[in-house]
Amino acid sequence: MSFTELVPALRGLPKADKLRVIELLAGDLAREENAEQLPAGASCPIWSPHNAFDAARTLMQLLEQERATS
């Protein structure tokens, strides 16, 4: 089936199926490029500044030092 034949069929899919097609194609491309991919259901920890009180305290100290020297 050619691309021009696929487009109308893809546009007719419900939203959830369109997302599954995107996931499928993105996964295929990643595998073709030998890109690392998380296994299904795996999580990847990401740092967030939320509740980073030590970092906030350090930044405040630096700002206060900057104000004092200005």
Image: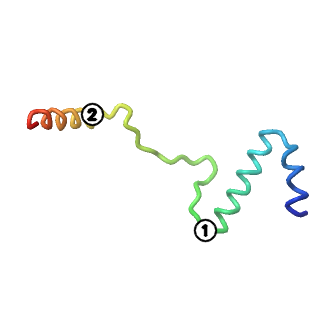
* Sooner in the amino-acid sequence: mark 1 or mark 2: 1
**Residue under label 1:** 34
Q: Where is 37 relative to 55, above or below? A: below
Q: Quadrant of the C terminus?
A: top left
Q: Quadrant of the N terminus?
A: bottom right
Identify the element where label 1 is drawn.
loop
Kindly give the residue lying farthest to the front in the view shown. 70
Q: Which mark is residue 50?
A: none
The x, y position of residue 69, in whole percent, is: 8, 37
Q: Where is 11 relative to 5, above or below? A: above
Which amino acid type is marked by label 1? Asn
Q: Residue at x 77, y 51 (%)?
A: 21
What's the coloring here?
Answer: rainbow
Q: Residue at x 58, y 54 (%)?
A: 38
Q: CA distance from mark 1 to mark 2?
A: 39 Å
Q: Quadrant of residue 17?
A: top right
Q: Quadrant of residue 60?
A: top left
The x, y position of residue 51, in whole percent, is: 35, 31
**Residue under label 2:** 56
The x, y position of residue 44, in whole percent, is: 50, 48
Q: Where is 34 relative to 45, above or below? A: below
Kindly give the residue lying farthest to the left in the view shown. 69
Q: Residues within 10 Å of mark 1 (few under 14, many from 20)?
A: few
Q: Residues within 10 Å of mark 2 (few under 14, many from 20)?
A: few
Closer to the camera in the image, 60 or 16: 60
The x, y position of residue 28, in whole percent, is: 70, 61
Closer to the camera in the image, 24 or 67: 67
Q: Residue at x 14, y 33 (%)?
A: 67
Left-right relation of 4 to 47: right
Left-right relation of 51 to 44: left
Left-right relation of 26 to 21: left
Q: Quadrant of residue 46?
A: top left
